[in-house]
Amino acid sequence: MDQHARIRQLHRDGWTVGQIAAQLHHSSKTILKVLAGPAPDPLAPAATRAAPVFDPVRGIVDAILAADETAPRKQRHTAQQIFRRLVADHGYAGSYAPVQRYLKGRRLDRRETFVPLDHRPGSRAEADRGHIAVDFPGGRRSVPVRIVTWSDSNAPFALALPTERTEAILHGLVEAFGFFGCVPAEVWWDNPTTVAVHVLAGRERTVHPRYAALAAHDPFTPKFCLPVTPREKPRVENRVFDPQRQWATPVPQVVDLAAWNTHLRPCCVAARGRTCGGNPETVQVRFDRERAAAAPVPARPFDPCVFHPAMVDKYQTARFDHNAYSVPRRWAFRPVTVTGYV
């Protein structure tokens, strides 16, 4: 209990000033001062401690920290290194503690703060990928899992895929839209080169032609986070861990990817029965609003493949993805287009 409150409580209980002083190890003068004065403000900040020895070198510390902004992360000064430089180069005669306190205050002042994101139902979905260890008959493998999550309801979709190539991403999104039964207005990604071929200024991207074709077919607007800012899609960043922590513990044992996906599908449905983010409504209730506001899935599904031009050689083969595929002899020495699926 706060000492001021304890003194007042004992005084209300009939204790004398001398008894309170003896019990709490304060002088009678201090007890009388507390009883006569107003209650202290618990939010009053502590007085800044004077640092007459450190204050003259404060600007030097600021200059060191400013130079560190452009240095590699692992080559920036620690508090101990700054202290040693102050002593060796600038004749600092103080202790290490003021340097440490000042740097701690600087870190607190510079820490990022955030505002929770809110989204209109049906307006946005977030996509990412994780990896799950799965035991197959041939041994344990790390399997890529595509995760798609609606930003408002947090309704998830997960699909294990053999690769992380563009055709796998296209296949994963087509499956996700079919599973949800609707298409969001926007789909947000980090900046995988299989989707964003080139990262330009700001949020401008050169989008892979086949991903642009999918966005035009369904349709939705491709969106991308700024580099190194995955917090712009926090829903899916958290959902990536669900297959690892909840759906794949212990390590699943399956015969093939199809069996693993058969296991994942009911897990995604069951996740809708939960609440999240302090919202009393279940994910299913919120997703129903998303589905009502989102666009319908086109009646004719998108063909999730990539196209690659090739030339048939004298061996009657066309090369695609470092492999040679046989074609009829009549196509020898002719240009062809190879269609690649996941």
Image (cartoon, grey):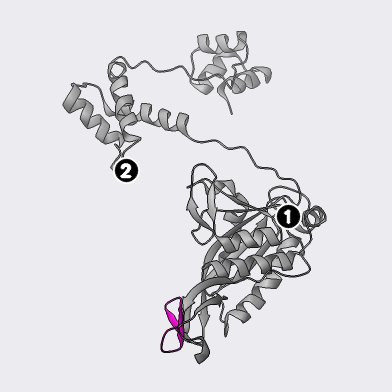
Which amino acid lies under the numbered mark 1 shown in the image of this protein? Thr
Residue 142 showing in the rendered view:
no
Relative image position of residue 34 (x, y in whole percent): 57, 12
> Which SS class for mark 1?
loop
Please identify the residue farthest to the bottom as the structure is shown: 329
> Which SS class for mark 2?
loop
Residue 15 showing in the rendered view:
yes
Residue under numbered circle 1: 275
Residue under numbered circle 2: 72
Relative image position of residue 75 (x, y in whole percent): 28, 42
For residue 337: magenta?
Answer: no
Residue 225 in the image: above or below residue 180? above
Per the rendered image, the range of residues in magenta is 312-324
Residue at point 54%, 46% (across, down): 204
- Density class for disc 1 (Cα within 10 Å; few <14, some 14-19, many ≥20) is some
Residue 100 in the image: above or below residue 36? below
- Precedes in sequence: disc 2 or disc 1: 2
